[in-house]
Image (cartoon, grey):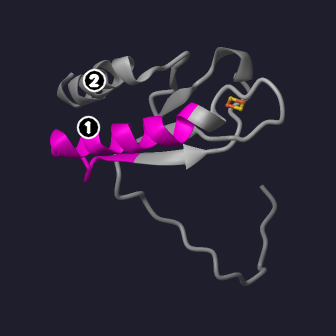
Amino acid sequence: MPNSSKITSMQISQPDYQKYLFVCENKREAGACCAEAGGRLRESLKAKVKEKNLEKKIRVSRTGCLDACSEGPNVLLMPDNVWFKKVSAADLDEIVSRVSASFEG
Ligand code: FES
């Protein structure tokens, strides 16, 4: 890695959250996989995370296209690198349960 003496304002730190659930809310012109459902899924997912008192550990956040459009709506769990694809509201309890269980094991 080249040694750089350039002075910037960049700061490096550890995030406060242990896990991130990224919900695609990308708006595509045709064949939108995520745009319509993504917002509702994210709000419901946030509420469920809060119900389990996990909101200090898990950040639910919107994201742009995750390049899996044909399999959406999509949710990506990081840093676990786990995809939840073709997600519906009926799947959210299972997603939260799986993420919650990952803290135990
Ligand atoms: S628009 Fe959601 S993954 Fe591409």
- Name the residue rendered at 53%, 66% in the picture: 12
Q: Is residue 80 above or below residue 11?
A: above
Circle 2 sits in a helix, a strand or a loop, which is it?
A: helix
Question: Which quarter of the picture shows residue 29?
Answer: top right
Distance of label 1 from label 2 (alpha carbons): 7 Å
Which comes sooner in the sequence, label 1 or label 2?
Answer: 1
Please check the rendered image and state whether residue 43 is part of the magenta-colored stretch, yes or no: yes
Q: Is residue 9 above or below residue 39?
A: below
Please check the rendered image and state whether residue 57 is part of the magenta-colored stretch, yes or no: yes
Residue carrying label 1: 48
Number of numbered labels in the structure image: 2
Q: Contact, CB < 8 Å: mark 1 with mark 2?
A: yes
Residue carrying label 2: 93
Query: Which contiguous range is marked in magenta?
Result: 37-59
Q: Is mark 1 within 8 Å of ligand 1?
A: no
Does 90 sit left or right of 86 as displayed? left
Q: Which residue type does callout 2 highlight?
A: Asp
Q: Which residue type does callout 1 highlight?
A: Lys
- Name the residue rendered at 79%, 72% in the picture: 4
Q: Main secondary structure of the magenta part?
A: helix
Ligand 1 is found in the corner quadrant, namely: top right
Circle 1 sits in a helix, a strand or a loop, which is it?
A: helix
